[in-house]
Amino acid sequence: MSQTATVPHSLLSATIEHLQHFAPFDRMAQEHLTYLVSHLHLGYYPKDAIILTPEQGVAQRFYVIKQGSVVGEQVDEGRGDEEGVNWQLVQGECFPLGALLAVRPVVSVYRAVEDTFCYEFRAEHFAELIRLSPAFSDFCTRRIANLLEQSTLVIQAQYSQKSNARQSLSTALSTLIRRQPVTCQPETSIHEALRTMQEQRIGSIAITDKHGKPAGMFTLADLLDKVALARADISQPIGTVMSTDLVTLAPQAFACEAAMAMARHGVHHVLIVDRLKLVGVISEKDLFALQRIGLTEISVAIHNATTIAALVPIGQDIRQLAHNLLAQGVSAEQLTQFIATLNDLLTQRIIALECGEAGLEGLEFCWLSLGSEGRYEQTLNTDQDNGIIFQVPPGGQAGQIRAALLPMAGRVNLALADCGFPLCKGNIMAGNPQWCLSLDEWDAKFAAWIQRGDAPVLLQATICFDFRPLYGATALAQELRARLHQKIRDNRMFLRHMVMNALENRPPLGVIRDFVVSDAEELPHSMDLKFNGITPFVDAARIYSLTAGLSETNTPRRLRGVCEQWRMEQKLIDAWIDAFFFIQLLRLRVHHQQREQGRPLSNRVDPDTLNDLDRRILKEAFRQARKLQALLERDFQF
């Protein structure tokens, strides 16, 4: 039984001050905190006392732990909409948000781990505070997303003295358009177009048809290459010398997308098109922060490199760029996209150079990215996972084609290692004959894995199931993906093996302490953010996606893609993705700190070294992983 007493008026200010040390109370208006505290009661629960159970019916109170700790013990693990399976809540944390918002009983038993005091707030007052306070409402309905936003602000404050760049990569391109685009039509003479550029003091001009639809672009580089050096007649139409390889984006696209598009295509301008009509032109100079940290410069250097030696320092440039972006407070999603984009460009250039040296004309093959690279989820601490798929021509033999490809593949693996991507310890690389296979050989390998479905093959299977084409004949990878989906759909037992394997890796949440840690050689009293944190999301998303027949390999996009087919609530998907990206961001920050301190990069972290906010979000992220695993177990009980 709780012993309750109304909080005296004399303690109101002290109680508000205490609550303001914790989210979301630190962001609430004073009048809303006053309303909260004036309706609080203080409850006391001795060690092992039961606070809430499902049998008590619809939740009637909102609890904030003032002192002590509470453990939640889930009764029905098949329910995916509650806090998790056996987790601990400590000072400043609150419960049971899900039950109060849904006006239902809790699905867990809440028990005091030690003598515990809780601030208690009746359900009707909770509902009123949701209506009154936007900050409280946002926290209750988007708990992990709200905490992530607070964490981002902390990170930006911590690194504010390390970076002068201020423009957000989440800025919509529409807000970067400073003027109406300067245009001319294809039949305009070169001379007239140049006069317009001089009058407007611009280095490029867009060419559109009479309806405003973009047809081309003319820049100072075109002037040099196609007019001056070619001694072209400047009375001829601009359409004869304009560049038609255009990169276009919608106004609602983000600055990060424009930066990545410039990097991929080696251009300096992106055309903003709305309903087929040109509405603006964004240049690399408009992306001020990106220009300062050299994204475009890196991509141009990759495109222009003619030797492997010229590419080696660029690998370091990419890692330095990632550190700079992290220091600016760039989100994990954007940062991993930048890393993946530049790593892809670097790898593609290495393959192209080595293929040119090897003389492989006439061979139909595709370089495959596997594992985290295949999922676009590389961090600063990643090794190689890759392979080759090739087509055997009529009358040819797979062994002959493989023999021709392996020397090139081996040189690419070594070049990537020189650029900062260590060789795979498990030797899952294209230079290994086991991973340089024909379409039929890959098909047979997948078939054998699926037929066996035992633990020794699951690791290799999960790495290879995340393949995507990076260079060459992409149709081969598409055909292999189609065959794989057919095999998966026809073998539910293999899916069950994958589920059982995935559920063996439980997020390290403790019952007595916040986290379960272990002693590793590189760091005692630590946990592995990749294996214990990221992998549960990756494994579950892969299983749902393969069952649904989706070709997507990226974990967040897989989760978004299966939402409707598996009838999952959007709020659950959003929470899982937010949790996934927080752990990714924490990994990147750990790598950043390790690099600055000159230590080897590792995914292990001692939770005692994290600040209170990061510990709280990490615990919530692990709880989200447990929710996803509970849903996975429920959906694949066959």
Image: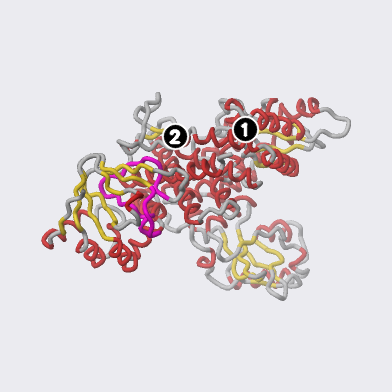
Q: Nearer the viewer, residue 130 or 291?
A: 130
Residue 168 horizontal side relative to residue 22, left or right: right
Quarter residue 233 falls in: bottom right
Vertically, is 312 above or below 129? Answer: above
Up the image or down, 464 lies above or below 52; here it is above
Q: Which residues are magenta?
A: 82-107
User: Which label was assigned to residue 57?
Assistant: none
**Would you say the residues marked 2 and 1 are in contact, meaning their CB atoms lie under 8 Å apart?**
no
Crowd around label 1: few <14 · some 14–19 · many ≥20 (10 Å): some
Report the residue marked by disc 1. 461
Residue visible at 51% across and 51% down in the picture: 334
**Closer to us: 559 or 463:** 559
Residue 401 is one of the magenta-drawn residues: no
Tell me where residue 139 appears, x and y as whole percent: 36, 58
Q: Position of residue 291 (x, y in %)?
A: 51, 54
Report which residue position mark 2 lands on.
Answer: 603
Please name whichever residue, 18 or 410, is drawn nearer the observer in this view of the structure.
18
**x, y (%) of residue 482?**
72, 43
The residue furthest top is: 521
Left or right relative to 283: residue 246: right
Instruction: Write the residue at 66% across / 67% down.
Output: 206
